[in-house]
Image: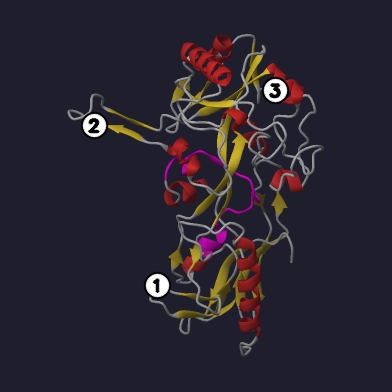
Amino acid sequence: MFSTPATGLVQDPVTKEILGVKAQTGVTFASPPSYSYTGGTEVYVKAAKGVIMACGGYENNPEMSLNFLPGAKSNFVTPMGSPYNTGDGIGIVTSAGAKLWHMNSGEVYELAIKPASQQMGSAVMVTEVNSSPLSLQMILVNRYGQRFMNEALYWTHTKKSLAVDYFKDDVPPTDPDDYCDYPNIPFWMIVDDARVKAGVLGIPSYGQQGYSPMVGWLGTHNIYQWSSDNSAEIAKGWVVKADTIQALGSLLNTTDFFGRPVSMDAAALATTVTNYNNYCAAGNDPDFGRNPKTMTPIQTPPYYAMEICMAMLNTNGGPVRNQYAQTTDVSGNVIPRLYSAGEFGSIYGFLYQGAGNLPEAYGMGRVAGTHASAETPWS
């Protein structure tokens, strides 16, 4: 029964056995980027042997993300997977008494273009750092017009990107300021005209010529095709353009982590770009030790900026399960006839084994199916 969202479990109040699923059929799905549904008729589906929950993560649920994911990433990411991963299953299983684990485990993937991703409802990925031949002809700067990290790191499945999440906390009288903030949020990618003319800045489309295929929702569903000369995205305002670096900085206005209006320090941005170009000429980055082979000067006008955010691959939190994929309650007892598989209650906690979610889904799905099919049907 496709396009039939599950809304609850049917549970025996005495034995706690799971007897079936409550669902909504005949719903109407909204157009992107909302990805919500309305209407429909409530139905009850009997499960003679058991129910296997394979509901995915909660990365598209802002409230859950803000509560469970540590640091600024919880409020400054754009999910790149299914927009329908809104954590509905977590509420369903907790209503049945399930215990949760690994709720603070989320995998950040790479960089995305914030305004484009917000408009499309899923991550519009940046070509830079995505293994394209144009990678790293850029710098990243915060609202103070300053670089804050080595941009030439491997972004996928790494905690090195946590420089984005740096939290500054000055408390008087020990510290000179009464100040707390995420100073590197928001942040922008700065490039010049030579980079823009060299190729596309975003790759949301699957298998775009000359670039690594995008594996996110927009790419695999071919929802948006980035223009070959970046002109459409400049017209949309996703890419900001100006004749000088300082003029470019004066156009960069957005909100900070707390939703307050902030603007770019345009003069500082001009100084940062001048310093970076000098580093390129010298073949040395004294600020962050970036490999000179990855450094290309930003010196051909006009200049361009894109507000950037992190792209969330998936979350791993959900119900605790045992070696038979059975879901357990808060006391460690098995909830009869209830199973889970995949990233919905994944074994991975704070550290995630690269490429581990897929074999876990295969393995625990097989375990869950084997044990659920062996249950004695209830009548």
Q: Earlier in the sequence, mark 2 or mark 1?
A: 2
Q: Which residues are magenta?
A: 71-92
Given this view, does label 1 or label 3 mark the residue nearer the observer?
Answer: 3
Label 2 vs label 1: CA separation?
A: 40 Å
The image shows residue 359, relative to residue 40, as above or below, that is: below
Give the residue displayed 45% in from the left and 30% down from the top. 184
Q: Is residue 342 magenta?
A: no
CB-based contact (under 8 Å), mark 2 and mark 3:
no
Label 2: how many Cα within 10 Å (few below 14, some 14–19, many 20+): few
Label 3: how many Cα within 10 Å (few below 14, some 14–19, many 20+): many
Question: Of residues 137 and 247, which is closer to you in this image?
Answer: 137
Q: Is residue 85 magenta?
A: yes
Residue designated by label 1:
330
Image location of residue 299, percent across then percent down: 63, 14
Given this view, does label 2 or label 1 mark the residue nearer the observer?
Answer: 2
Label 1 vs label 3: CA separation?
A: 55 Å
Question: Of residues 330 and 364, which is closer to you in this image?
Answer: 364
Give the residue displayed 23% in from the left and 31% down from the top. 171
Label 1 amino acid?
A: Val
Residue placed farthest to the right in the image?
209
Label 2 amino acid?
A: Val
Q: Is 306 left or right of 275, judged from the image as shown?
A: right
The image shows residue 180, relative to residue 300, as above or below, that is: below
State the quadrant of the N terminus. bottom right
Quadrant in the picture for residue 207: top right
Give the residue displayed 62% in from the left and 82% down from the top. 372
Image location of residue 358, percent across then percent down: 64, 63
Residue designated by label 3:
195
Image location of residue 123, percent across then percent down: 64, 41
Residue designated by label 2:
171
Question: Of residues 178 and 92, which is closer to you in this image?
Answer: 178
